[in-house]
Image: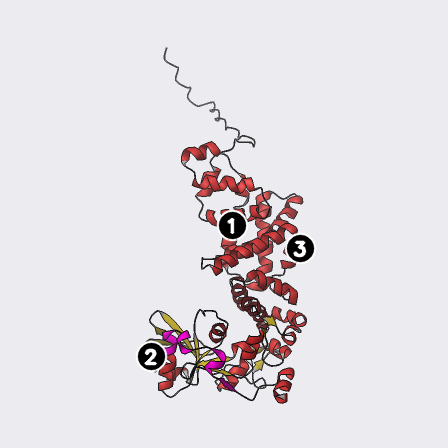
Amino acid sequence: MIKRFIRRVFGLPANHMERVPREKHGLGRDAITPAASKVCAVLRDAGFSAYVVGGAVRDLLLGIQPKDFDIATDARPEEVKPLFRRAIIIGRRFRLVHVMIGGETVEVSTFRAADPDTAEKDEHGRVLRDNVFGTQAEDARRRDFTVNALYFDPATEEVVDFHGGLADLKKRLLRVIGEPRERYREDPVRMLRGVRLAAKLGLALESATRAPIRELAPLMERVPPARLFDEMLKLLLSGHASACLRQLREVGLHKGLLPLLDVILEQPLGERFVTLALAQTDERVLTGRPVSPAFLFAALLWHEVLAAWKARQARGERSIPALESAMDEVLDTQCAKLAITRKLTATMREAWSMQPRFEQRSGGRPYRLVEAARFRMAYDFLALRAASGEVPAELEEWWRSFQSADAETRKAMLLPETGPRKRRRRRRKKGPGAPAAAPEAV
């Protein structure tokens, strides 16, 4: 017991394994899908070990239905593939096998080693390459958090626990495996994942796991932007985005992810706008409705665009060119950090650029706007602005009625022209040699 306590306090690797029977954890083989169960059975019959691993085990123990089931085994990819009729080997740096059974795809990975002394690292300690096969104990040690290093054996219904993950789940704690500073330096994204998992699962970050995050937050700047974008997207679409962003601020991580988030949340209207956007996104995710990442990023960054737009107009720039420049300015800053894809930024720009057009409710302009390809997204954005108090509620109500009204009602709803009327072009006078107009018949 004392040795175990010392190892945990000092982040030393565990040298023991617990096989916990079903009566102590309550998880049975009927909790996993038939496809996952079959993959494990086939591997076992071929003489290999096979376990459901990671997030699926964690979620089942917390009473959450996993989205998918991953399998870990001591079989190499080239040994796994021939055992199944529909299976493909994927990956370059580390090969995995995707086994297709019915409509389900089960990912099978070979146990990986984790040797901090031999892994290739950069000057800051970030691991660049450690993709070598290993033992189950090594595979458990290289995982990030104790609750993710649990292995469920469908044959015996035992949970194999190397790092006290079951005890941490009971305490509702999220604890990093090993010495936190070293593990964060190996992969700074672990700090972000810790915040996301804690918020999503309702766990508390263990004190030693939480303590170094603010100090090591600058390491996030060295994470490849594409990977950071993927992790940020997972966070925002987790169904617990509001809690995640609050936690990011508390631990000091937000400046490396959304550099302008502090400014957004310091503005009363901006904070209400972002809070409403996150709450709506969480509600859609939790009820199984589709969510647009472009809409969410557009909402998170809108008040930065708005502030830059107003500043440019105050300097005398015309409204629409000023808005275009403001969008460029904000997106350049964010894309340097998050590698937001061009497809998303194009959609975001459409939603933003259509906002001034909602002010135009006379003539043929409302008809053209309603027919625009991104009208629905732009209108939803307007509704969010109205709900936050940024624009009058009457404006959103008008457009809500106009888009569903019949032709006669729409015509009656149009506002009178208030701007200066365009001057009609005069006909050019004919030159001296031009033929005279024919006299009118008498």
Give the alpha-carbon distance from disc 2 to disc 3, as whole Å.
56 Å
Q: Distance between the residues labelled 2 and 1?
A: 47 Å
Is the Cβ of the residue at disc 2 closer than 8 Å to that at disc 1?
no
* SS type, badge 1: helix
Residue 36 visible (yes or no): yes
**Label 1 – label 3 distance at C-alpha:** 24 Å
Check disc 2 and give the amino acid type.
Answer: Phe
Give the colour scheme of this rendering: secondary structure
The numbered mark, 1 or 3, whose residue comes first in the sequence reads 3
Q: Which of 151 and 300 is in front in this view?
A: 151
Left or right for 126, reference 155: right
| Farthest left residue in view | 85
Crowding near the residue tagged with mark 2, few <14, some 14–19, many ≥20 C-alpha atoms within 10 Å: some
The image quarter in which residue 96 lies: bottom left
Which residue sits at x=51%, y=50%? Answer: 351
Q: Position of residue 406 (x, y in %)?
A: 41, 37
| Span highlighted in magenta in the image | 16-38
Q: Residue 266 carries which label?
A: 3
**Is label 2 in contact with label 3 (beta carbons under 8 Å)?**
no
Q: Position of residue 25 (x, y in %)?
A: 49, 79
Residue beneath disc 1: 351
Identified by mark 3, the residue type is: Glu
User: Mark 1 packing: few (<14 Cα in 10 Å), some, or many (20+)?
Assistant: many
Residue 202 figure quarter: bottom right
Q: Residue 352, relative to residue 285: is it above or below?
A: above
Residue beneath label 2, please?
84
The disc, 2 or 3, on the residue closer to the chain's N-terminal end is 2
Residue 67 placement (x, y as % from top left): 44, 69
Given residues 366 and 62, the one toward you in this image is 62
Q: Is mark 2 on a helix, strand or loop?
A: loop
* Nearer mark to the viewer, of 1 and 3: 3
